[in-house]
Amino acid sequence: MKTKYIKNILLSGVLALVVTSCHKDLDRKPFADVTSASVYTDFKNYKNVLAKCYGALALTGQVTGDGNPDIGGVDVGYLRGWWQMQELSTDEAVIAWNDQYLLPLHSMDWTSQNLLVSAMYNRISLQVMYANEYLRQTTDEQLSRNGITNQADIAENKKYRAEARFLRAFSYWHAIDMYGSVPFVRETDPIGAFFPKQGTRTEIFNYVESELKAIEGDLAEPRSNEYGRVDRVAAWMLLAKLYLNAQVYTGTQRNADVITYCNKVINSGYSLNPNYRNLFLADNDKIKTEIIFTIPYDGVNMKTYSGTTYLVHAPVGGNMDAPKDFGIDGGWYGLRATKG
């Protein structure tokens, strides 16, 4: 009897140890030093987080040169994917490569099985997620909770949030333009596994329109923001583009609004550069009068095969003199404009 009693005590002790051990394992702190709890207590980090929202339009992942991609299975970044979806699916251009996703685009065969179609869909969703997370972490309540009380920082944060909302609206415009009805997720939605509501084209159109109008006054004055960041003219330009296809998106024509917002852009201080070719030079960052919204690339920090490197190298080939005529070491023998 004593033996049985002792065995029961030992068994209970072992179970208690297992339960305690399991409890502690589930209650561990993250191994990484950089977490939202540490990042958002220092306002100097806020701009770096916003930079990720911008940078993901250019780079494929966490480092320059397409390394450590945010999405596995495809090396196509946001800008390259967007360009290919918009151009290679029309009669404007073709590309002479044998990538499995290219030929269906030329034959207008769009399915979820196409690698580029699914990759661009995921890129858009990821961009929305980045913006949502920034907005979730930078409310007035969160600023107070994180000890951000300097009034200049609070005012600057308002501008940062407006830019994040613009970038989210920008990607939602791409979503309804290329995919129609898509999952509709905002910063107020739950974090983690939940099934988001699908927004119709009209619903998301209305949301993008309302967001752009709401942030207009918080964005920088025309041509006053630093290179690579948007000002309020970018919001006006996006509204003009949104209204231009309003009949497709919602069934209601909005051409009068197109004219209104185009006039706002025209009268904002931006103007056409006298030499169109200069817009495509490596130092086009100096042309600040025409380019309204820039996605920056350079040969040091923002190197990638998915941006302007692709647009410059892919059309060059055959008997073209790449160094002399294009200033590059060689072409990729890919893109061709169609005869028509």
Image (cartoon, rainbow, N blue to C red):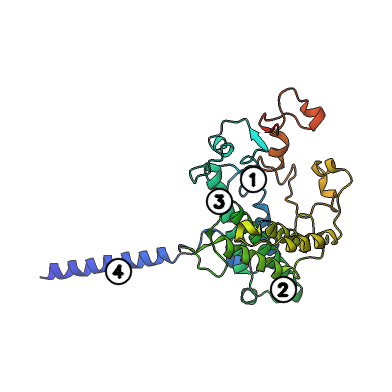
Measure the C-alpha gap from mark 4 to mark 3.
48 Å
Of the residues tagged 3 and 1, which is closer to the observer? 1
Measure the C-alpha gap from mark 3 to mark 2.
34 Å
Instruction: Please tell me how crowded label 1 is: few (under 14), some (14-19), or many (20+) other residues with Cα within 10 Å.
Output: some
**Can you identify the residue that label 3 sits on?**
121
Q: In front: 56, or 267?
A: 267
Mark positioned earlier in the residue sequence (1 or 2): 1
Mark positioned earlier in the residue sequence (1 or 4): 4
**Can you identify the residue that label 4 sits on?**
16
Of the residues tagged 4 and 2, which is closer to the observer? 2
Mark positioned earlier in the residue sequence (3 or 1): 1
Marks 3,2: beta carbons within 8 A? no
**Can you identify the residue that label 2 sits on?**
154
Question: Would residue 101 be found to the left or right of residue 13 on screen?
Answer: right
Q: What residue type is labelled 4?
A: Ala
Residue at disc 4, secondary structure:
helix
Q: Residue at x 32, y 67 (%)?
A: 19
Measure the C-alpha gap from mark 1 to mark 2.
39 Å
Residue at disc 1, secondary structure:
helix
**Can you identify the residue that label 1 sits on?**
86
Instruction: Please tell me how crowded label 2 is: few (under 14), some (14-19), or many (20+) other residues with Cα within 10 Å.
Output: some
